[in-house]
Image (tube, rainbow, N blue to C red):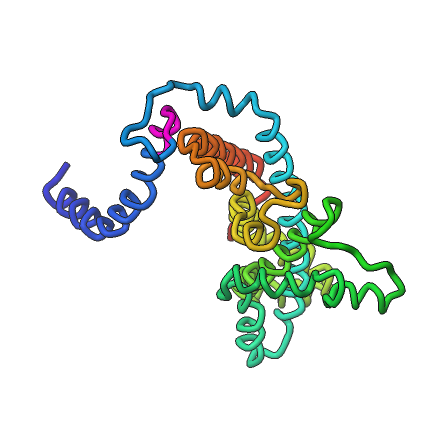
Amino acid sequence: MSAVRLRENAAGFMLLSPSLLILFVFVVIPIGYSACLSLFSWDMMRPSPTFVGFDNYVHLFGNPAFYSTLTRTLLYTVLTVPAAMTISLAFAILLDKGVRSLITIYRTLFFAPIITSTVAISVVWMFIYHPDYGLANSVLQSLGLQPLKWLNASSTALLSLAIMAVWKQIGFCVIIYLAGLQGIPAELEEAAKVDGAGRYRVLASIKLPLLTPTVFFLVVYLTIEQLQTFAQVDVMTKGGPAGSTELIVMHLYNYAFERFQMGYASAIAMVLLVIILLLTWVQMRSAGRKVHYQ
C-alpha cells in the first residue's frame, strides 16, 4: 500500500473516530455486557453474580410466558407496520401534488407526534380511550355503535395500542415517503404523460417502482421499532389487563426491575437481538430485485 493511500485511510479513520467511539461506548459495550450477564444469576443485591452457564436460556425457552409475549409482539408488529405504511403512503401521494408552499406546514403537522414525548402522547390517548367520557366511544356512539372498554378489556387492549402506534408512526412515514416522491425526476413523469400515460399509470409504473428503496427502508425501520415497543405499554396498561398487552420488552423489564433477575432479563434481550437481526436479514434477502434504484 502506498504512502498516499495510508495517509488517506488514516484521515478517514480520524474523521470516523468520533462516531466509532460513540458506537463502541453506547452500543458495543452494552451488548457485550448484556451477553456476559445472560450467563450469570444476579439479583443486584449480591456484590457479585453467580455463573450459571446457559441455564437462563434453558429457563427462557422452557417458559410458556416467553412464547406468549413473543407471539403477542409479532402480532402487534404485523398489525402496526403495514397499516402505518399504507395510510402514510396515501397521505404522501396526496401531499405530493399539493401546493408546494404548504408542504412545509403539512410536514410540521404530520411530524409533530414524532417529536412529542411518547409518555405525553400516551396520556392523551388514555383520555381518548376512556370508557365513560373518551373521544373514541363518543365517535362510536355517534355512529350508532356500542362503546368499547378499549384498554380495560383483554380483547381490545392490544388493538388499542396498535391504533395509537399507527397514528404515531404516520407522520414519520409521510415525511420519508414525500422525500422519496419528490426525489423522482420530473422528466420521467413528463415523458410518460407525453406517451399518453394517465395519473394512475404514472403512479403504478413509475413512482411506486422508484419508491421501493423508501418502502424497504420503512419496513426494516418500523419492524425494529415496533419489536422494541415499551413506553406506551408501560404508561397505558403496564402489560394488562391479564397480560394481554405484555410485549417482549415489557416482559424483559418485569424480570429485570420487578423480579430483579438480571441474568434472565439479559437472556431475553439477547434473544430479542437475534430475532431482530434474523428478521432484518430475511427482509434484506427477500427484497432482492424488488427494490429498484435509479
Residue 163 visible here: yes
Residue 63 % position (x, y): 57, 24
Identity of the residue drawn at 67% across and 41% down: 242
Residue 196: in sight, yes or no?
Answer: no
| Residue 19 in the image: above or below residue 55 | below
Quadrant of res 191:
bottom right
Q: Residue 153 in magenta?
A: no
Instruction: Identify the residue at the far right of this view.
Output: 144
Estimate the x, y position of residue 49 in percent, counting from the top left: 32, 27
Examine the structure image and report whether residue 36 is included in the region drawn in magenta. yes
Give the image location of residue 282, x and y in percent: 54, 34
- Tell which of 186 and 46 is nearer to you: 46
Q: How many marks?
A: 0
| Residue shown at 58% from the left, 58% from the top | 169
Q: Which residue reaches farthest bottom?
A: 101
Q: Which is nearer the eye, 19 or 119?
A: 119
When the figure is inspected, residue 106 is found, relative to residue 163, above or below; the finding is below
State the image quarter where residue 98 is shown: bottom right
**For residue 283, side relative to residue 46 (left or right):** right
Compare residues 204 and 214 and report the one nearer the observer. Answer: 214
| Left or right: residue 230 compared with residue 149 | left
Quarter the N terminus occupies: top left
Q: Residue at x 45, y 33 (%)?
A: 265
Q: Residue furthest front?
A: 45
Left/right placement of residue 23 relative to residue 106 reads: left
- In this view, the residue in front, 289 or 10, is 10
Stretch of the chain drawn in magenta:
34-42
Q: Which residue appears at 65% of the width and 51% of the height?
A: 162
User: At which x and y percent is residue 69?
Assistant: 60, 35
The quarter holding residue 197 reads bottom right
